[in-house]
Image: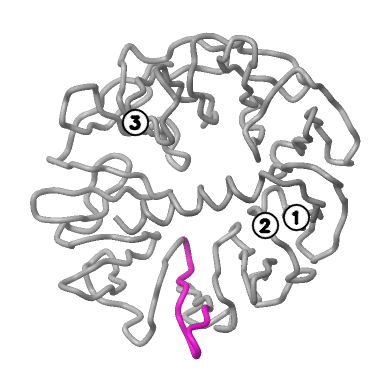
Amino acid sequence: MKTLILITLSMVLICQAHSDNYNWDIIDRQGNVVHKVYNARSVSPFSEGILVIKYKDRIVFLNEDFEETFSSSSFSLAPFEEMQNNRLGFYDRDSGKRGYLNRDGKVVIKPQQYDYIGKFVHGYAVVGFGDTSEPTPHHLEYRIIDLFGNYASPIIFDRVELSRYDPGKGIGSKPNENTTFFIKLNQSQWKIAENKGDFKDIVGFGERIVARTEDGFGVITWEGEILLKPAYKAIWSVSKWGALVTIRRNDIVVDYEGNEILADKDVRHVWSDYAVFIGLNDKQGVYDLSQEKDIVPPMYDSIVLSSGNEFQVSLDGKKGYVNSEGEVLGEIKYDLTLYFSDGLGVAGIIIED
């Protein structure tokens, strides 16, 4: 699938990028640099009042005033690891296992048998067990835990995804069973919910789910209600307005009635209220579906939604931000940008040896 290929390439590029150190700017929504971090391997998006900085030999937490609240050389973090639900995943070098810290730097879930840990979503996280030597460890088995590390489901999954938009909703599948089912939180336990269709290959796309039946791909809610009847060869992206689909050999945007929209634009991606389109000289711009007008002119090499009001753009090999008025925030001069969170963006310039 094109989506999986793009995700894989993005992960490779990120892994290559953070093999070196950067000087980082923290940028507000007016484009002002409000703080600088020097010679760090990664800086997380600002989340829950904490900025997580990873240096070569230590990690540091900064608060909203950019004051250091915690520093340690005892923990190893994944690049750009961020605080969610007052939990931050870490790797214990001695045991080779993983656990969680809180915003004060205290270990709240000790390194146990986890070989994989996910971010907390509305108070729950997915953890995995098995050999993680493969780049994409699909052979792991997964469980759901609560904020204190207690198992919150009797089910062992071979794949599970919790919705970030619909609390208490998710999808999963069991080992050696070729079916995907919906799960629902019921009195602090995740249980199998009623299946409302013979859906296969279910993948969450934010507020919506892309699902396949024998008739093709369609779009459903996190409760299994059909929004777009499965009938398409592929679905590349979805929004609350509709989806970018492949019908016959053409990629088009359809609404949830199946009607083609934006037929006059070469759309490459849809999300939330926006659609990225190709304009003159293969440059990308943004169309606002709610306002029915272009808000970012087609002048960039690539555009990615960074938050509800900001976009990450690239131009001539450099990256930066623009807002939903099409205004550049600061400068387009960075080697790496992260998405806006809590009103702040994080952008880095690689330090040359």
The quarter of the picture where the N terminus appears is bottom left
Residue annotated with mark 2: 337
Residue at the spot 70% in from the left edge and 61% down from the top edge: 335
Q: CA distance from mark 3 to mark 1?
A: 32 Å
**Mark 2: which amino acid?**
Thr
Q: Is residue 229 above or below residue 75?
A: below
Callouts 1 and 2 close, C-beta under 8 Å: yes
Report the magenta residues as a range.
272-284
Q: Secondary structure at mark 3?
A: loop
Q: CA distance from mark 1 to mark 2?
A: 6 Å
- Indicate which disc residue 96 carries: none
Callouts 3 and 1 close, C-beta under 8 Å: no
Q: Is residue 284 above or below residue 145?
A: below
- Across and down, in percent, residue 268 comes to 40, 72
Residue annotated with mark 1: 348
Q: Is residue 106 above or below residue 292?
A: above
**Mark 3: which amino acid?**
His
